[in-house]
């Protein structure tokens, strides 16, 4: 016996889309005055509406956009009416195309990569473009229970009336199955292995049994699932081969070039900065380049010119961490400086990102400062600032 899940049994997020002819809203405007970080479908509602209005290509069942329009939303472009779609992901186009077409099939999508390669960011925007709702989310942790993926119970109803439809609390995955939408599971490899395997039946049979009621939920057309994972964190739980076979895996690489990484950091910091009323990014583009250069050299174990081999610290020094360092530097410049991002504003953040192991990483950082930064033309102010916070 199959059972449908009433969407009203779990209160949905309240979205307030912008009109199609509106300018793309800032983060502050999109989700209301109190939304610090609006959902993707809110923050970019105008772009999604413009794409939907001009999208005349075939759409899979229950998709808000065609695969072509979803890829355009992520990669950016200019529509025939002149609407500019900002890029959400800067990287190889083929990666996005493979990810989007995977969601149009019956195979789930696994976004794999080292920390900071925009897995969560891409996952959110894919769900927003495909289903118009990125909030059907399971956040994976070491304590994620099976109920977070399957379903739970309203224990007051359960004790009063026993197992019933009224007592059942659907998970985000169950709701996505019943409504033909895209569910998201973040940090899949942090979830205990026995809980991970709850997904096997869902992904292979497209069915979620409810043995307590003698019923099941069958996925309707349009349902799919995006998971993200990395294998760099300690304590991860490897995916079983049975579960991995249910996914099409797409690996998100680190940015190929310094210019691409500077572009990513600048765009993301600008978005975050607007929501926090911080100074414009162009005022600090030189410092962004320096932060990216430091991170890439220490991450790659060699200087940009290839002449000096370097030791790499224990941290990942990802693009996401570079964004955090620059955002914090902008806040320092705005509240305790003249509003212009300078070396002294990012030095402490870089030190915190590089020196994770107080013993080994500090030696690596000091060696990098003395052998590379000190001798580099135009970096004297950066060297002094880093020496000051490292003392």
Image: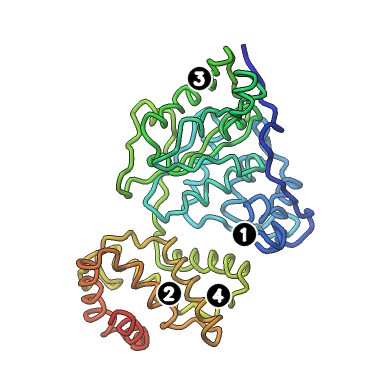
Left or right? Give the position of 162 relative to 389. Answer: right
Q: Can you tell which mark lies on residue 86?
A: 1
- The secondary element bearing badge 3 is classed as helix
Measured Cα–Cα span from mark 1 to mark 4: 16 Å
- The secondary element bearing badge 2 is classed as helix
Where, by quadrant of the figure, is residue 236 drawn?
Answer: top left
Percent of width and height locating residue 372: 25, 79
The first of marks 1 and 4 along the sequence is 1
Measured Cα–Cα span from mark 4 to mark 3: 49 Å
Q: Which residue is mark 2?
A: 289
Q: Can you tell which mark lies on residue 205?
A: 3
Few, some or many C-alpha atoms within 10 Å of disc 4 (few <14, some 14-19, many ≥20)? many
- The secondary element bearing badge 1 is classed as loop
The first of marks 4 and 2 along the sequence is 4
Q: Which residue is mark 4?
A: 281
Few, some or many C-alpha atoms within 10 Å of disc 3 (few <14, some 14-19, many ≥20)? few
Q: Residue furthest front?
A: 160
């Amino acid at each position: 016996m199959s059972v449908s899940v009433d969407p009203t049994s779990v209160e949905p997020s309240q979205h307030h889309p912008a009109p199609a002819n509106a300018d793309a809203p800032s983060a502050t405007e999109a989700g209301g005055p109190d939304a610090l970080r609006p959902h993707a479908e809110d923050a970019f509602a105008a772009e999604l509406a413009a794409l939907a209005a001009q999208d005349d290509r075939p759409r899979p069942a229950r998709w808000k956009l065609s695969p072509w329009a979803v890829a355009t939303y992520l990669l950016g472009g200019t529509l025939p009416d002149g609407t500019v779609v900002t890029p959400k992901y800067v990287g190889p186009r083929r990666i996005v195309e493979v990810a989007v077409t995977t969601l149009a099939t019956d195979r789930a999508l696994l976004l794999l990569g080292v920390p900071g390669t925009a897995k969560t960011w891409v996952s959110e925007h894919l769900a927003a473009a495909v289903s118009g709702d990125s909030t059907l989310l399971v956040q994976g942790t070491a304590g994620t229970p099976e109920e977070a993926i399957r379903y739970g119970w309203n224990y007051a109803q359960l004790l009063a009336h026993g197992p019933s439809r009224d007592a059942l609390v659907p998970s985000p995955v169950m709701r996505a199955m019943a409504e033909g939408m895209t569910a998201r599971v973040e940090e899949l490899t942090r979830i205990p292995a026995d809980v991970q395997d709850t997904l096997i039946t869902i992904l292979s049979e497209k069915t979620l049994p409810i043995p307590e009621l003698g019923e099941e939920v069958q996925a309707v057309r349009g349902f799919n699932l995006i998971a993200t994972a990395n294998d760099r964190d300690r304590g991860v739980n490897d995916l079983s081969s049975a579960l991995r076979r249910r996914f099409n895996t797409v690996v998100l690489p680190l940015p190929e070039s310094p210019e691409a990484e500077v572009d990513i950091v600048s765009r993301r910091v600008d978005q975050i900065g607007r929501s926090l009323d911080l100074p414009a990014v162009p005022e600090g583009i030189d410092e962004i380049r320096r932060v990216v250069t430091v991170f890439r050299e220490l991450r790659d174990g060699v200087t940009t010119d290839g002449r000096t081999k370097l030791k790499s610290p224990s941290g990942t020094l990802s693009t996401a961490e570079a964004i955090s360092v620059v955002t914090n530097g902008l806040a320092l410049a705005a509240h305790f400086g003249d509003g212009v991002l300078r070396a002294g504003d990012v030095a402490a953040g870089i030190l915190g990102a590089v020196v994770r192991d107080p013993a080994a990483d500090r030696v690596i950082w000091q060696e990098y400062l003395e052998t590379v930064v000190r001798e580099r033309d135009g970096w004297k102010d950066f060297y002094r600032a880093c020496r000051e916070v490292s003392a």
